[in-house]
Image (cartoon, helix red, strand yellow):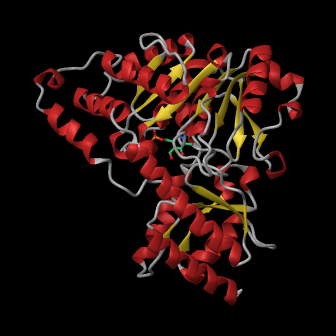
Amino acid sequence: MKHFTPSHALNRLPEQFFAKLVSKLNTYQENGHDAINLGQGNPDQPTPEHIVQALKDAADNPVYHKYPPFRGFEFLKEAVATYYKREYGVEVDPTTEVAILPGSKTGLVELSQCFLNPDDIALMPDPGYPDYWSGVAMTDAIMEPMPLLQENDFLPDYDAIDQATWEKAKLMFLNYPNNPTGAVADQSFFEQTIEHADKHDVCVVHDFAYGAIGFDGKKPMSFLEVPGAKDVGVEVYTMSKTYNMAGWRIAFAVGNPSVIEALETVQDHYFCSLFGAEQEAAATALLDSQQCVEDLRQTYETRRNLLVGGLNDLGFNVQPCHGSFFVWLKVPEGFTSEAFADDLLEKVGLFVAPGVGFGAHGEGYVRIGLNNPEQTLHDALKRFAKYSKSS
Ligand SMILES: Cc1ncc(COP(=O)(O)O)c(C=O)c1O
């Protein structure tokens, strides 16, 4: 059998961190051990019934059995514009300022392909969602980490980026509410972002995956709410988290028309949009009652209170968690993040994500997901208590 050598682009791809994590957990469970999985970010609840019903009804429509329009149905883009107006007071032109994506993971990789040439710089949050790296690696551009430090509320410090880096920078990825730290951004941070991006011609990609999940009565801000945002970038919004639709693979990008056009052009070659019935169900999700979203948000807030309260009572060092469904926990003295994650798994069957998997500045932390029912989180706390006593 011949072995065909993958392209340089493929060889540059980093190891898929989440795939490696899952295989570690699988091996542990295959060996007969019982583990609580706190390591992943997969929403644990079903898609709200009215959205599933909309898909079932629309599946009968023969219009959707044909190829959909290349760039998706206009009714979905209009629903996105209505959503942004209703939720954030942001005006969006559905035709030129919205692109439908087969999941935001795909869109985030495509954005690097759209704008980066070899040796350009992409500014990356560190720690950050690892899929940003994949697109950059394929283009042979350079990743410049922007450390997210606790003393800066896990926001990048733009003054720490030198002039030469700004000059070569073409793209900047941001994500608030933040995976993995649980931090949120405020208006003044986004204003600084726009100022720097405008000055240095950097395209900002704000990943708003956890836009619906904010705690303590504070609704997370859309980047596009801030004047000037559309001039310098786009926001990427997934249906995966807001509506528990991770398996459906549907998201959208909203904002700067030249960025949207570039995304649409790439996608004209890769895809022929998504199944029309799915697009209709997605429009239903965006336009119908948002009670399901509020219920979901409250569920995560209750879980956060339970887990953070319990961990603090046990003496663990938990970082403030204002949004997203992750808790960012400092590892005890003397451990690396991987050593602590391994120790938790081996001693008490708790599976968490080592912070170093999200970048060098994730070292010293582990990420705990809130994607388990309260009862499981109670059980997890009992295991943390047992771990504390044993160490
Ligand atoms: C920060 C962030 N962005 C993007 C995604 C990808 O979401 P999807 O591809 O389901 O739209 C995730 C998924 O976990 C995420 O955490």
Please identify the quarter of the rendering in which residue 241 is found. Answer: top left
Residue at 46% over, 10% down:
96
Q: Position of residue 320 (x, y in %)?
A: 71, 57
Q: Does 259 sit left or right of 312 as displayed?
A: left
Residue 258 visible, this orientation: yes
Where 380 sits versus 237, above or below?
Answer: below
Total of numbered circles in the picture?
A: 0
266 or 273, which lies in front?
273
Q: Position of residue 12 (x, y in %)?
A: 60, 37
Q: Does 5 sit left or right of 159 as displayed?
A: left
Q: Position of residue 111 (x, y in %)?
A: 55, 25
Where 80 sits versus 27, above or below?
Answer: above
The quarter in which the C terminus is drawn is: bottom right
Q: Does 211 sit left or right of 229 as displayed?
A: left
Where 295 sits versus 380, above or below?
Answer: above
Q: Does 216 sit left or right of 79 as displayed?
A: right
105 or 49, which lies in front?
49
24 or 61, which lies in front?
61
Residue 12 visible, this orientation: no
Residue at 47% over, 12% down:
93
Residue at 30% over, 32% down:
284
Residue at 88% over, 23% down:
163
Q: Position of residue 190 (x, y in %)?
A: 72, 29
